[in-house]
């Protein structure tokens, strides 16, 4: 499958559009309401039980999450890479747009059910949501602040933060630990389960899945997908929380060396050589995955197993957004991944799946969508 290149003018246009959609640069956007289910009986059905974060702390975190004033030039917020109406990721681009229109290296992972993620970022470099929350504020390609002190001084200069800060911490002035704690509390509130699958498997509602979806789940188990996307007796995180090389980075690297098909107009495409792409486009940056954190050779090109919950809402897929549809992901695994990568996980092998089997797997994956996430209005 050929990947559309990320041309500079496309990226710049997307960045400008994002800023326009979010409102006037420098203004404080109004945070949307909390993630609430449409009359769901149990929005956490299928997930392990968790303590809800303190409401005042989560409310402060929500305000910080949607505030573009926290970026160095007032143009970006957390919500612009984790869009509520797009499964708390970005559907239009393989990777998000960062400061001054730069293409970020990796696909923005969903924040839905991130409370259950033990090691954050796809390379696992943060061991808690609190440790993760501050990193985008300082990354030069993301919110690009020179220091945490600069962020805290800016927050303290905004009168509209004084009351929510006092409500959360009984004190008026911002601290780095407070920012991290508040953002983490808001992210922990983004629970989205109670899917059709949960009602069928854990709620024992026999009609919650149709025959095709049930067939897809049977194939999912039969072909060993549950080894990495776990389903336990009383809950299903659909991840083993481990890091695996599934061949995708090698697949992307191989494609980078080839000409790419560029759509000039509907129905009209042309092949662009890699030499031409280097002149007009933004090349993907090298990515060694978990190895960049651990420096263990076994971790080269390994990335954290994502949960499959709400996966129908969170495309494009893989750490680099290189697959645009769930059908293309199923096709990739059915073909055995990237056999030319000698370090690819040995459990990935060609699967005997006909067209009906593949459609059933996609249907099953669609059954993992929570009504909480599906009902999010446009922001």
Image (tube, helix red, strand yellow):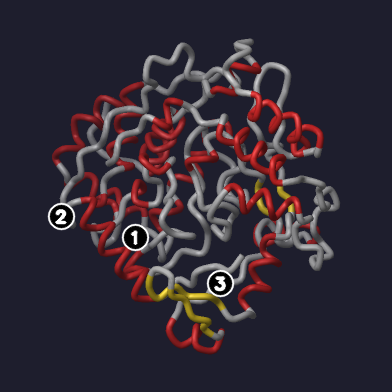
Using the image, tell me which numbered label, if any, was put on residue 24: 2
Q: Residues within 10 Å of mark 1 (few under 14, many from 20)?
A: some
Decide which of tag 1 and tag 2 comes sooner along the chain: 2
Q: CA distance from mark 2 to mark 3?
A: 31 Å
Disc 1 vs disc 2: Cβ atoms closer than 8 Å?
A: no
User: Which element is circle 1 on?
Assistant: loop
Using the image, tell me which numbered label, if any, was put on residue 178: none
Front residue of 258/321: it is 258
Q: CA distance from mark 1 to mark 3?
A: 22 Å
Does 19 appear above or below 207? below
Quadrant containing the C terminus is top left
Q: Specify whether 24 is left or right of 19.
A: left
Residue positioned 71% across, 67% down in the render? 250
Q: Which residue is mark 3?
A: 285
Residue positioned 65% across, 59% down in the render? 289
Front residue of 271/159: it is 271
Decide which of tag 2 and tag 3 comes sooner along the chain: 2
Quadrant containing the N terminus is bottom right
Location of residue 33 (image quadrant):
top left
Residue positioned 76% across, 56% down in the render? 335
Residue 116 placement (x, y as % from top left)? 57, 31
Does 323 appear above or below 360? below
Q: CA distance from mark 1 to mark 2?
A: 20 Å
Residue positioned 32% across, 63% down in the render? 14
Between label 1 and label 3, give the one nearer the viewer: 3
Residue 306 placement (x, y as % from top left)? 62, 43
Does 270 appear above or below 141? below
Decide which of tag 1 and tag 3 comes sooner along the chain: 1
Q: Which residue is mark 1?
A: 145
Does 189 appear above or below 301? above
């Amino acid at each position: 499958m050929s990947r559309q290149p990320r041309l500079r003018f496309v990226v710049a246009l997307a960045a400008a559009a994002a800023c326009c959609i979010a409102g006037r640069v420098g203004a404080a956007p109004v945070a949307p309401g909390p993630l609430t289910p449409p009359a769901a009986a149990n929005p956490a059905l299928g997930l392990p039980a968790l303590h809800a974060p303190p409401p005042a702390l989560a409310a402060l975190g929500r305000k910080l999450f949607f505030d573009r004033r926290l970026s160095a030039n007032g143009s970006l917020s957390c919500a612009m890479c984790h869009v509520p109406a797009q499964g708390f990721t970005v559907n239009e681009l393989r990777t998000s747009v960062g400061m001054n229109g730069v293409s970020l290296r990796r696909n923005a992972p969903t924040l839905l059910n991130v409370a259950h993620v033990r090691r954050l970022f796809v390379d696992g470099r943060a061991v808690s949501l609190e440790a993760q929350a501050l990193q985008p504020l300082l990354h030069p390609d993301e919110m690009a602040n020179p220091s945490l002190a600069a962020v805290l001084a800016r927050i303290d200069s905004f009168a509209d933060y004084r009351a929510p800060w006092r409500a959360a911490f009984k004190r008026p002035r911002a601290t780095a630990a407070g920012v991290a704690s508040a953002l983490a509390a808001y992210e922990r509130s983004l629970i989205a389960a109670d899917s059709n699958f949960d009602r069928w498997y854990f709620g024992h509602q026999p009609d919650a899945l149709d025959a095709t979806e049930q067939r897809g789940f049977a194939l999912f188990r039969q072909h060993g997908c549950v080894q990495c996307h776990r389903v336990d007796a009383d809950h299903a995180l659909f991840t083993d929380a481990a890091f695996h090389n599934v061949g995708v980075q090698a697949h992307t690297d191989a494609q980078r060396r080839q000409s790419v098909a560029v759509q000039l107009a509907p129905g009209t495409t042309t092949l662009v050589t890699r030499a031409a792409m280097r002149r007009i486009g933004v090349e993907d940056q090298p990515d060694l995955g978990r190895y960049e954190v651990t420096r263990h050779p076994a971790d080269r090109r390994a990335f954290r197993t994502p949960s499959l919950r709400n996966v129908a809402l969170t495309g494009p897929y893989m750490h680099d957004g290189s697959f645009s549809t769930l059908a293309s992901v199923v096709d990739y695994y059915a073909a055995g991944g990237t056999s030319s990568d000698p370090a690819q996980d040995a459990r990935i092998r060609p699967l005997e799946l006909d067209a009906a089997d593949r459609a059933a797997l996609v249907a099953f994956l669609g059954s993992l969508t929570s009504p909480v996430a599906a009902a999010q209005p446009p922001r």
